[in-house]
Image: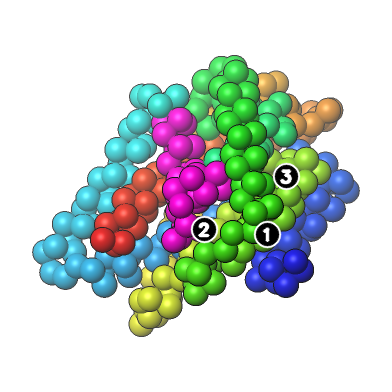
Amino acid sequence: MLVALKPFRAFLAACLLVSALALLLGSAHAGLIAGLCLLILIAGLPHGAFDLYIMAYRYQGQTLSLAIGVYLGLIALTVLVWLFLPLVFLTGFLAYSAYHFGDSDWPGTSLGQKLAWGVSIVGLPCLIASNQVAPLFETITGLPDLSRFTAIAGLLAIPACLLSGLSWMMRRQSQSDQASAQLPTTTASGLLLLCYALACALSGPLAAFACYFACLHGPFHLDRWQKRIAPPSNLGIYALSTLVIGCVGALAFWLPANIDSSASTLAALADQLDSSALEKSVLDDSVLRYTFVALAALTVPHMTLLMLAKR
């Protein structure tokens, strides 16, 4: 059993670390929130930035230029949906992410197993810490009172986790999983979901997701594609990741979230906040908002490209 978890030491260590930090500092500590957003961007963006090499591998000349244009167009379309149809944006982002997580982390397995994993990753935070996730959704969308939406998303995690647990107990094993740098057994998936849930309960939903995205999903995805397409240099990955991080930082400072600090995500996460923390809450909410809007805007073309690349 422990052997099955060996490839995921970074994820497990990250869960322990953020849990300890949350217990020491509090899950709403401004420094911890900023650090988690930075972790998501720095460690998670490179696997999406690798799309540039995937496009260069599949397309040449004018076709490559057209592919890049479509990719950028999908980013712009996602941002427009966020601006004018925020609830549609949030619903689509969560659904798209759930499918992507399952499809990327468990290639070669059944659609049901993929969906069970992806819905568990998205839904567990909503189930375990709905009072913290709802303000996060409100921060991202700018909409008031998404507690019912969050509760529904959390309920979806129950059958998803049961299906994942059933697969774990039956100990099915996919040969394609063993052949790639992916989750090698259903035993590992069950234990990883358990660790994910514990991290969510102890350190908060943002911390748990940051550990998953930065230390499990992103690295495994990037490793698999780097083995298929050996890039001449990683400079493009780092440059694009830096550009996105710079854009998030600039937007947070120049276009702060128009949210009442008394209803901010930090205020909802903490039992008490002093006046200095309340003064910083708008900036912290802005970082949260633009971090996840950036992830969503990149997820749509990222998934579209991967689906085309598998053909």
How far apart in space, not on screen, are marks 2 and 1 (Cα)?
A: 14 Å
The residue most toward the right is 24
The answer to the question of whether label 2 and label 3 lie on touching residues, with beta carbons closer than 8 A, is no
Residue 217 in view of the camera: yes
Looking at the image, is mark 2 or mark 1 earlier in the sequence?
2
Write down the region rendered in magenta: 89-118
Looking at the image, is mark 2 or mark 3 earlier in the sequence?
2
Q: Nearer the viewer, mark 2 or mark 1?
A: 1
Identify the element where label 1 is drawn. Answer: helix
Quadrant location of residue 132? Answer: top right
How far apart in space, not on screen, are marks 2 and 3 (Cα)?
A: 17 Å
The answer to the question of whether label 1 and label 3 lie on touching residues, with beta carbons closer than 8 A, is no
Of the pair 128 and 133, the residue shown nearer to us: 128
The amino acid beneath tag 3 is Ala
The residue most toward the front is 170
Identify the element where label 2 is drawn. Answer: helix
Residue denoted by label 3: 197
Crowding at dot 3, Cα within 10 Å, few <14 / some 14-19 / many 20+, comes out as many
Crowding at dot 2, Cα within 10 Å, few <14 / some 14-19 / many 20+, comes out as many
Q: Residue at x 47, y 68 (%)?
A: 176
Q: Relative to 123, does residue 2 appear above or below in the rendering? A: below
- For residue 102: magenta? yes
The amino acid beneath tag 1 is Thr
Residue 113: give its label.
Answer: none
Residue 187: give its label.
Answer: 1
* Predominant SS of the magenta segment: helix
Instruction: From the top left corner, tell me how far across and down residue 68 is, in percent.
Output: 24, 57
Asked whether, in this view, residue 74 is left or right of residue 15, the answer is: left
Residue denoted by label 2: 105
